[in-house]
Image (tube, rainbow, N blue to C red):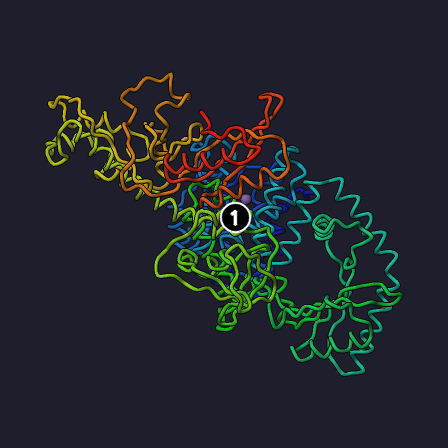
Amino acid sequence: MAVPGKKKNIEDISFISFKKKLQKYLNSYQIKKIEKAFDLAKDAHHGQKRQSGENYITHPLDAASYLAEYELDHETIMAAILHDVVEDTDISLEDLEKNFGKKVTELVDGVSKLDKINFNTKEEADAANLRKMILAMSNDIRVLLIKLADRRHNLKTINVLKKAKAKRIARETLEIYAPLALRLGIHNLSTELENLSFQTYYPLRHSILSSNIDKARGNRKLLMNKIQTEVTKKLNSESIKGQTKAREKHAYGIYKKMKSKELKFSQIHDIFGVRIVTDSVDLCYRALGCIHNLYKPIPGRFKDYIAIPKSNGYQSLHTSVLGPHNLPMEFQIRTHDMHKLARSGIAAHWFYKTKSSISKLSREQQWLNNLLDIQKQSGNPTELLGSIKEDLNPGKVYVFSSKGQIIELPKKSTLIDYAYSIHTDLGNKYSSGLVDGEHKPPNTVLKNGQRIIIKKADVSNPDPAWLNFVISVKARTSIRNYLRSIHENDAIRLGEKLLKACLDELQVSIDDVPKKTLEFILSEHKYKTINELYKEIGLGNKIPKLIALRMAPSFKKTESNISYDIEGSEGLVMSYAKCCYPIPGDMIVGYPSQGKGIVVHRSNCKSIRHTKPNDETIDLQWSESVDNNFSTSIMIEVENQRGVLAEISAVVAQSNHNIESVNYVDSRITGHNTMVFVISVKNTNQLKKLLDKLKKIKNVFKAERKKS
Ligand code: MN
């Protein structure tokens, strides 16, 4: 309650306790600067209220005060206090830079959202804002720390928001911000964000689980006390100095485990555990010895994260044992330094920016760089958002590189994922892979502890089929990116050939086209180079005949028969219609299809019969040198007899053709047993020979090419 006559209000009081925190680790010059930032923010937000009815300044003050607990530098604290002024008040970035310098301004800019006006939907805006923040934080990780402190206070005061909005924020936190905090090793904050969001997103599950935990805690209290006493006594007798503390898994952690392993609450054994914190690594291992001496260890449940730290730098020994009454429980053993790091992660690194912590930082930096790579290769912000969510949330598998380094990959990663995780170039040039010294196919799923060696080819040649099994975002975006660039080159080549063929038809060479005309046509479509024009033609976005006519208007069209030759090696920009399956020897015609290039049909294909040849149609013919295999479909009528399919397959295989698919046509419709095969052949001659052989099989009544 406000006391009349006294002007001190609540935020002044919280500022005083905030200042006390700062005085523990900052000098008076730095604190003065922070005070200046506070005064400006308070003025700027003057009159603004939080939804809760509190003055707005309570929000940035809470964020700054939280970061001060991690003893973060004064620039971070200032930026935290100022983090909403640009977005929500009249203060501009220029104003900030004038008053507080470039660094603080960059930090504030990093957490400020983009103008809403520029987006159609909330999702689009969210994705673009996340991309902006990722860019800023890869430059300066403190941006993320401020964002996390901001989000923490928003969640703590989330009850006043409308349900739908609160749920959206909680969900985003569970999907992105809590995993980001964990990724950077800030366990405390990650746990707090998770629990706050869990409560909002799944209120019922949260309350049931919490009451279960309370009940279990009551039951176990005596037991935990007993264990603590036993352990302390044992450690003392071995003169191992260490603190023993009972610990409890947090509600969302339990929920995640129940969900991912499909367990009941009663089946979760590590809800309660014991943590031992000692002075040195040596003492950690000795304490482990004591515990295994005292209680029976459960095989396969010991993990040495001291020798092999987790990817976020986390170190500890974990072991599960059978405690009194054969109750399983987990012990975590670590040094004081490891304990501090486990709680504050990268925030601790930032404060102790010493040589030793910089090497630890490199793991996080590596991950951030990875994120930046994905960012660069992703087509749009929404794609990036999806990639990041995936990257943050999968399980992990750990393998060894040829040099013995530990490489962390998402679960179910394959040799190709591994190659791309080492380097994009290694993925693109993958030629073969060895798992524990044995050659394995590229889709081999890797298991913990395997040693991987990748052999490299001289040139890049990623296989589009890899996209069917790769699991990591890095591999997928890299392969797609490479194919996209290949696709582009194919499109340029095809476009050039198509346009030149059309000009040929008009008996003009591209060199005859006046420079002015060419420039005019290019500028009309805003193309910078002739290659862009070729590309658009090759992708089916522009009609080559129309462009040719515009290039050579004064030349008359002659009735020549020159048409474009198909080599069969045009790549992804030329495709063969699945309605009529054209193969060399067939009369064919092409239709440009937006973005997909040219689709080739048989001239007598039913699906195009109603469309008369027009300016869009491209006269095509097979090149004499074409030697590829093409898919085509045949129909075979058989007597329903066992083994006939095997006989057909044998004949196809003996003739060196492949069966790509087989379908049975319902006999109730045809009155016969009919099978439709898709097979690959080089041309109509081969097909005819094959059909003749098939007809000779006993029990085959009819074998013919399928009509469209
Ligand atoms: Mn805020």
For this rendering, which residue is in front, 20 or 373?
373
Q: Quadrant of the N terminus?
A: top right
* Residue 61 picture location, percent across and down: 57, 49
Q: Quadrant of the C terminus?
A: top left
Q: Nearer the viewer, residue 211 or 421?
A: 421
Q: Is residue 301 above or below residue 387?
A: below
Q: Nearer the viewer, residue 143 or 696?
A: 696
Residue 71 appearing in the image: no
In this image, 226 relative to 555: left or right? Answer: right
From the viewer's perspective, tell me whether residue 266 is left or right of residue 43. right
- Residue located at (67% from left, 71% from top): 334
Quarter holding residue 330: bottom right
Tell me residue 524's x, y (percent). Answer: 22, 29
Dot 1 amino acid type: Ile
Camera-nearest residue between 391 and 680: 680
Q: Answer above or below: position of 401 versus 67.
A: below
Q: Is residue 30 left or right of residue 496?
A: right
- Disc 1 element: helix
- Label 1: which residue? 388
Q: Residue at x 60, y 64 (%)?
A: 310
